[in-house]
Amino acid sequence: MTENLASQLKELIVERLFLDINPEDIEDEVELSEYGVDSFLLLELIVAMEEMFEVKFEPSDITAEVLKSVQSLVELIRSKQ
């Protein structure tokens, strides 16, 4: 996994979703729901990721499995770049 991409994504998650944690406290494989990220926030995150990483997600890309963790999101972004 590209560390840089993961750390950028963690910063994005904290900033755009207004989470009260430090980006470095988010672990790559821990489910985002553990940090208080719900389905509404995930929609916001998808839009933010498309903007930041200049990728376009198809509806079929957006599955519960993919939206689970930083690691799964990094894999999705890399597959679209």
Image (cartoon, helix red, strand yellow):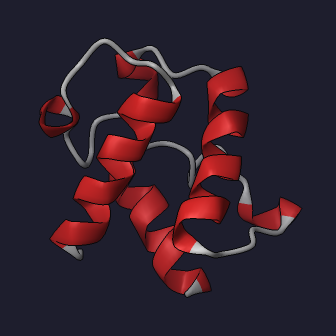
Quadrant position of the C terminus in the picture: bottom right
Q: Is residue 66 above or below residue 76?
A: above
Count of marks overlaid on the render: 0
- Residue 61: where, in percent of width, then height? 73, 65
Q: Residue at x 43, y 59 (%)?
A: 72
- Residue 20: where, in percent of width, then height? 31, 12
Which sits in the foreground, 74 or 10? 10
Q: Is residue 66 above or below residue 34?
A: below
Q: Residue at x 36, y 19 (%)?
A: 34
Quadrant position of the N terminus in the picture: bottom left
Q: Is residue 65 above or below residue 58?
A: above
Q: Is residue 9 left or right of residue 25?
A: right
- Residue 30: where, in percent of width, then height? 28, 36
Q: Is residue 47 above or below residue 16?
A: below
User: Where on the picture, by quarter, is residue 26?
Assistant: top left
Which sits in the foreground, 78 or 69? 78
User: Where on the picture, by quarter, is residue 43?
Assistant: top right
Q: Is residue 32 left or right of residue 42?
A: left
Which sits in the foreground, 70 or 4? 4
Residue found at the far right of this picture? 59
